[in-house]
Amino acid sequence: MTLSRTQESQILDLHLIGTAQRAIAKEVAVCLDSVNKRIQHFKQTGTTHMPYKKRTSQYDPQEEMIRQRIRYYLSLEKRKSRFTVNQLHLSLLNDGYIVKKSKVGQWVRFERNRLKESYLDIYHEPGVAVQFDWGSKTIRVNQRNKLIHFAVFALPYSNFRYVHVTEKMDSKSFVDAFISFTKHIKCVFSILLIDNMKIAVKNRSFRENQIQLTDLFKQLENHYGMTVRPCTPYKPNQKGTVENAVATLKQELHGLNQDYKSIKHLQNEINVIFKRLNDKKHPTKNNTCQKLMKYECSLAGQVPSKHFVYFHEITRKVRNDTLVSLDGNYYSAPEEYKGEKVKIKYNDRTVKILSSDGKTLAKYSRCYGKGYRKYRVWNMLRMHQHKSDGFDQSNQKRQLPRWLKKLYDQHFNQYAEDYFIFLELIKNASRDNVKRLLKYHSVHDIKLTSISAFDFISRC
């Protein structure tokens, strides 16, 4: 501690009259250590003044220049081709720097350590984000080795983990896994963090640094009211919680090493494993992962009343007989779309035919097999009017809805041309008006014809 000449004189005067060192420190308002050092220095040299020692600087300009040159050479290294200490030492000597090889080796080690990637300690808000990743492992199922895929979801705040077993890593498998996870936790988190998988990321604009999601994930965002956020390529630490969950899953499966009867049996075994893991205490929080997950769910969003329905999508050209093909079967489109391209969206149960602007043209239950044809009478009214004579023997009649078939048999039997004129009239009428039309003719016992239907509709 640096003292003024006045303070040093006061310390000496008080010491000479026999004052204790603690009292001197209190009187002069300095620390006891400073008083003790001045008195000891006075006894050795005869003066209390201690000359100020300048602190030597640790900065060596020559060393800094050499280390900057080393950083330059390290920046030229390639991923699988690194400079040796000998090469760097010779390069520095050629550049005119006189330095020992041992020093070069030490500074190279320091610079490589400085360039190693370090990670931020991120705090995760509860009820905000969920992380997703795929895992794969060859497992013996039904006495055969099979590559099984696992859709793993992890909550970074609570460290809660959920695994869905699937045989593929396609869009449908992801949707099934996400719906299964959502049903299990009964809530939706506002952010879904994923990696750059092909089913999610369509392309990346390096100029604007923007990621384009596929149509499927855009639909998921809109349906569940969340944000899908792909992480930076080759940066798995951004979703480290789910990466650790995948490693834990593989480790647990390696420990079991048994023959599973089916995929369902494997799913049940994994559910038991992760129930045990989720019931354990969180490593840094004073509660179990399961209870922390319930707290997160109370802060997250609600699940929509209906879950997302996944559809495959392809483009087909409508044939001249108004049919479009799908898996060897045929479905009818409206007559005005002959020769046009339409979109077909389909899943295991339903087939939808859409126009280029997204308007639904027809909807069918999906056929399995080969050669089946599905018709809608509304899509081919003009063709039926011109070929009404053969309608009674056609498949189109057999596929009529029950109420339209009943109308034909009761009122238009053997008058197919008039029947299709009647259908043309009610095609764009509202359902309530059609119901009133049929009830009116039934109550008043009037024969239903295209003329009587036109008179009734014109009065409505």
Image (cartoon, rainbow, N blue to C red):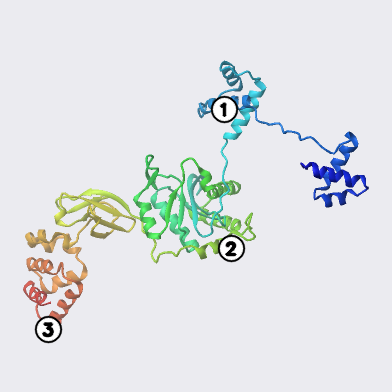
Camera-side mark, 2 or 3: 2
Dot 2 falls on a residue whose secondary structure is helix
Residue at x-position 48% and y-position 40%: 234
> What is the three-letter code of the residue carrying label 1?
Gln
Label 3 packing within 10 angstroms: few (<14), some (14-19), many (20+)? few
Circle 2 is placed at which residue position? 291
Taking depth in this image into account, of 86 and 321 the one nearest to the observer is 86
7 with respect to 249 (left or right): right
In the picture provided, is 452 more to the left or to the right than 312? left
| Image quarter of residue 227 | bottom left
The answer to whether residue 151 is visible is: no
Q: Quadrant of the N terminus?
A: top right
- Dot 1 or dot 3: first in sequence order is 1
- In the picture of the structure, the residue carrying the numbered disc 3 is 444
Other residues around mark 1 within 10 Å, as few (<14) / some (14–19) / many (≥20): few
Query: Can see residue 201?
Result: yes
Q: Nearer the viewer, mark 1 or mark 2?
A: 1
Taking depth in this image into account, of 51 and 220 the one nearest to the observer is: 51
Depth-wise, is mark 1 or mark 3 nearer the camera?
1
